């Protein structure tokens, strides 16, 4: 067989293998509504943004793209935000992809158990896909940037900001996963209790908020609401699973 035909045959085989993999993976979906094709495409995107060894989902596979042409808000999004990835658990579980949701919950539980946060509290707002927290921000001055949008940044200086809402999103996703058969073990629960105890003492602290403002800490209503969500989900876990806890009247 001529070399060109061999290359075409290899390409065809690889294409067929890839198509078979995605069809097999999508067959796990339990969604049967009218938006099936679009939701499947979205599910594939989430899968492609997942780091298989740890289950972490990146916010986006991009860095240095500006919010507006010529602007300076050119952030590096190739990391795992506790907030964004927690929302993804809902999407994955809602579509029936429990394995991916379980993998991320395992990653999140590791971060919860480490309690290796920074000045913002026991959790950082984002981590590398391997769970490490070194996200030192640098500007690559030798690069022009997309259509002249400078600076081009790698790393993310917002990584140790205080964003009080992340505790609500983390507890909510863990609770939601627990409702779908991804159980919270006692070791994880002990770590969650420690985080909730910290939150009980610090829920009213100011922070940078979900838009990661860099002009000083302020009080954000959303952070207050999600702090309540954290307490609510912790109480639900304790009462529904018979986990050890203490609270007024409990």
Image: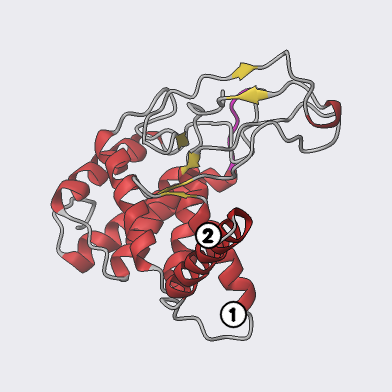
**Disc sitting over residue 36 in the figure:** 1
Q: Is residue 230 above or below residue 220?
A: below
Q: Is residue 217 a member of the stretch shown in magenta?
A: yes
Q: Is residue 119 above or below residue 113?
A: above
Name the residue rendered at 60%, 30% in the picture: 218
Name the residue rendered at 29%, 64% in the picture: 178
Q: What span is colored magenta in the figure? A: 216-220
Q: Position of residue 164 (x, y in %)?
A: 48, 39
Q: Position of residue 207 (x, y in %)?
A: 54, 31
Helix, strand or loop status at disc 1:
helix
Label 1, label 2: how far apart the Cα atoms are: 31 Å
Q: Would you identify the image quadrant in which residue 185 lies?
A: bottom left
Q: Is residue 250 above or below residue 164?
A: below
Q: Would you identify the image quadrant in which residue 92 lies?
A: bottom left
Q: Main secondary structure of the magenta part?
A: loop
Name the residue rendered at 85%, 25% in the picture: 148
Of 103 and 229, which appears nearest the observer? 103
Q: Would you name the residue on which mark 2 appears?
A: 10
Of 69 and 122, which appears nearest the observer? 69
């Amino acid at each position: 067989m001529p070399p060109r035909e061999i290359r075409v045959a290899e390409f065809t085989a690889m294409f067929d293998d890839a198509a078979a993999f995605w069809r097999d993976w999508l067959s796990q979906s339990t969604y049967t509504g009218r938006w099936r094709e679009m939701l499947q495409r979205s599910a594939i995107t989430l899968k492609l943004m997942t780091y298989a060894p740890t289950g972490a989902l990146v916010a986006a596979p991009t860095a240095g793209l500006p919010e507006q042409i010529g602007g300076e808000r050119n952030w590096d999004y190739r990391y795992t935000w506790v907030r964004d990835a927690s929302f993804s658990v809902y999407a994955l579980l809602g579509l029936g992809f429990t394995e991916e949701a379980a993998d991320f919950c395992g990653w999140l539980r590791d971060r919860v158990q480490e309690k290796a946060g920074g000045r913002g509290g026991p959790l950082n707002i984002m981590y590398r896909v391997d769970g490490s927290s070194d996200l030192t921000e640098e500007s690559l001055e030798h690069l022009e940037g997309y259509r002249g949008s400078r600076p081009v940044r790698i790393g993310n200086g917002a990584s140790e900001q205080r964003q009080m809402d992340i505790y609500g999103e983390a507890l909510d996703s863990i609770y939601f996963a627990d409702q779908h058969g991804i159980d919270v073990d006692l070791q994880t629960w002990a770590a969650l209790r420690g985080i909730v105890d910290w939150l009980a003492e610090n829920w009213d602290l100011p922070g940078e908020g979900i838009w990661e403002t860099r002009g000083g800490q302020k009080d954000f209503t959303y952070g207050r609401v999600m702090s309540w969500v954290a307490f609510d989900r912790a109480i639900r876990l304790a009462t529904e699973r018979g986990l050890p806890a203490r609270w007024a009247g409990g």
